[in-house]
Image: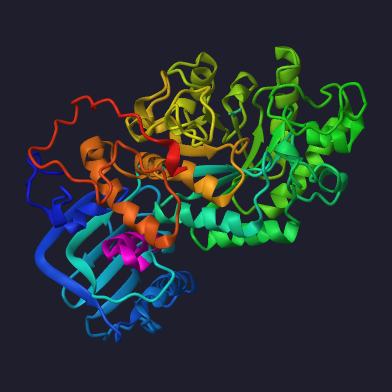
């Protein structure tokens, strides 16, 4: 797939074989055409297959490119008689497109001196081809201000398709609330790396963030708190729809989580009748977990769950409703099972698939159920059993994929209960062979959750997300055979200039040879060679 030897003289001294080999996540196949380049010019046109979906991808691309280039980049319908040239986004079902893949998300990108053509079977495939094209342009294409060219794309061919259908990230908007524009910015981060699911952790002990018409106090009372006594906040249903639509325009499905039966103090404060003793507890703005639970043996609880999940299902075009299920420490195992066994049919009754943290594995099966594994070990008999009964798994091991874990002991934000998670730790594992008894066929995908007990601003979010999100994205997208830390860290280093151009805060991990850091020449290290221990790094980059 990639050459075993590594030319010491390579692209701009980066250690990478060609500019076409810089793409992250690593594509399925890359064939550079040496010495060939396409130049984006003031006369470049974007042609698309004239469907609304393909045209929308063309407009998205034009919007990305217009500001930094200053070019008009009109989006026009592709015609049969078009002369080659410009950028073409073509839907194809005639065998000229990518190798068929089970997700339909694949694409082929061909760049010659006269033009760039992206072919795909779906608009999602075109969108992923556009993300690749974006990375092939110079880093300053990410700038929000007019830059000078030349705007070149290296010649060659990329054939690509994802390994897993579910590639996600989670944002906890409950511990600290993040307003709509901040969520939209996070969605844009997912889109860059071909992630296709945004899991929103909408409710927790510290706050309830989605308006529910049938239970209004959830937000008028439960939405007014957050960790450390901040003002909290919530999304109106209209704002939530705006988030869903913005994500959908980027081929990202929103997965809403209503965390049940634990992590419910904000709900119980709003409606004391839902509490086991029928008494509303005081509001909670600390960061302990596991102390709250809905009353399991009270029919009002199931009316509440049905009405809340019914409204959330109606706002949610995607197939999943996440019901949490973690850390209900005050319930007996029997009561916990009773609760989950009652709630799963409520979810399917609203036409959705159950998704839940892996503790729900102990409940009975539910058709189409997805179990999200967040443990730190590599065996879990209840998950193995649930998979044997048909469940699929999304892998979010705490010690690999949790974006709220500190990078090192000096990281000024985050937690360390699951360990320290530097970039290589986030990257060096295989979701298809991670959990005992969970074969690759049972793995729906991967997700990187960002819990926000210690995260209170957009730059906090970005400092913890970059550079680890791209590591998880590559595990979700790229073929297992492409897994290669030595190559990944070089490609990741190239992303640093893009983040800087886009104004994105990131952790300058000492494991990554960021531009400006000398690249050590010489033979490429064998993939299995242990990394030299990371030097202590000043926490000043927070
Ligand atoms: C979790 O981290 N409590 C799912």
Relative image position of residue 169 (x, y in whole percent): 51, 43
Quarter of the rendered structure image containing ligand 1? top right
Residue at 54% across / 33% down in the picture? Answer: 414
Q: Is residue 132 magenta?
A: yes
Is 159 placed left or right of 505 in the picture?
A: left
Q: Where is residue 162 in the image (x, y as percent from the top left)?
A: 35, 47
Q: Residue at x 19, y 61 (%)?
A: 157
User: Viewer-proximal residue, 418 or 117?
Assistant: 418
Above or below, 492 against 109 in this view is above
Relative vertical location of residue 254 with respect to residue 335 in this rendering, above or below? below
Image location (x, y in percent) of residue 529: 18, 26
Q: Is residue 208 magenta?
A: no
Q: Position of residue 210 (x, y in %)?
A: 74, 49
**Up/down of 452 relative to 117, above or below:** above
Q: Which of 494 and 21 is in front in this view?
A: 494
How many numbered circles does the render carry? 0
Res 326 visible: yes
Residue found at x 54% / y 29%: 415
Q: Is the magenta stretch mostly helix, strand or loop?
A: helix
| Left or right of 377, for residue 202 | right
The one of 469 and 197 positioned closer to us in this rendering: 469
Q: In which quarter of the image is the N terminus?
A: top left
Magenta segment, which residues?
A: 127-141
| Image quadrant where residue 322 sits | top right
Q: Is residue 274 left or right of residue 513?
A: right
């Amino acid at each position: 797939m990639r050459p075993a030897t590594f030319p010491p003289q390579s692209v701009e001294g980066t250690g990478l074989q060609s500019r076409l080999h810089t793409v992250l996540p690593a594509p399925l196949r890359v064939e550079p055409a040496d010495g060939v380049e396409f130049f984006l010019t003031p006369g470049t046109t974007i042609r698309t297959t004239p469907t609304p979906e393909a045209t929308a991808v063309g407009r998205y691309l034009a919007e990305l490119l217009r500001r930094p280039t200053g070019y008009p980049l009109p989006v026009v319908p592709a015609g049969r008689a078009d002369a080659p040239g410009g950028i073409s986004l073509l839907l194809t079902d005639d065998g000229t497109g990518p190798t068929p893949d089970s997700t339909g998300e694949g694409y082929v990108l061909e760049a010659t001196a006269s033009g760039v053509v992206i072919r795909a079977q779906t608009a999602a495939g075109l969108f992923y081809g556009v993300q690749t094209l974006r990375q092939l342009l110079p880093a300053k294409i990410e700038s929000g201000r007019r830059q000078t060219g030349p705007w070149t794309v290296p010649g060659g061919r990329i054939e690509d398709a994802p390994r897993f259908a579910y590639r996600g990230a989670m944002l906890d908007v409950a511990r600290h609330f993040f307003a709509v524009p901040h969520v939209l910015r996070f969605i844009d981060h997912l889109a860059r790396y071909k992630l296709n699911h945004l899991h929103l952790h909408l409710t927790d002990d510290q706050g309830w963030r989605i308006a529910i018409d049938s239970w209004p106090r959830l937000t008028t009372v439960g939405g007014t708190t957050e960790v450390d006594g901040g003002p909290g906040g919530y999304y109106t249903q209209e704002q939530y729809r705006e988030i869903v639509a913005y994500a959908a325009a980027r081929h990202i499905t929103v997965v809403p989580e209503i965390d049940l039966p634990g992590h419910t103090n904000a709900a119980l404060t709003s409606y004391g009748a839902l509490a086991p003793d029928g008494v509303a507890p005081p509001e909670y703005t600390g960061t302990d977990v596991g102390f709250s639970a809905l009353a399991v043996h009270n029919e009002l609880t199931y009316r509440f769950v049905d009405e809340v999940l019914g409204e959330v299902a109606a706002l949610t075009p995607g197939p999943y409703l996440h019901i949490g299920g973690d850390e209900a420490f005050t319930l007996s195992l029997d009561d916990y099972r009773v609760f989950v066994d009652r709630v799963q049919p409520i979810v399917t009754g609203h036409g959705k698939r159950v998704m839940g943290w892996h503790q729900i594995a102990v409940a009975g099966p539910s058709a189409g159920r997805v179990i999200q594994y967040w443990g730190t070990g590599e065996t879990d008999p209840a998950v193995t059993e649930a998979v044997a009964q048909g469940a699929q798994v999304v892998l979010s091991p705490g010690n690999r994929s949790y974006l709220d874990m500190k990078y090192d002991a000096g990281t000024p934000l985050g937690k360390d209960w699951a360990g320290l998670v530097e970039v290589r730790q986030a990257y060096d594992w295989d979701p298809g062979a991670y959990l005992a008894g969970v074969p690759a066929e049972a793995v729906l995908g991967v997700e990187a959750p960002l819990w926000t007990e210690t995260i209170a601003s957009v730059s906090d979010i970005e400092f913890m997300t970059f550079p680890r999100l791209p590591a998880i994205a590559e595990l979700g997208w790229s073929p297992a055979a492409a897994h290669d830390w030595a190559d990944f860290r070089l490609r990741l280093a190239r992303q640093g200039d893009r983040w800087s151009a886009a104004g994105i805060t990131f952790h300058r991990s000492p494991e990554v040879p960021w531009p400006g850091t000398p690249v050590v020449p010489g033979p490429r290290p064998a993939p299995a060679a242990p990394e030299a221990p990371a030097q202590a790094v000043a926490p000043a980059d927070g």
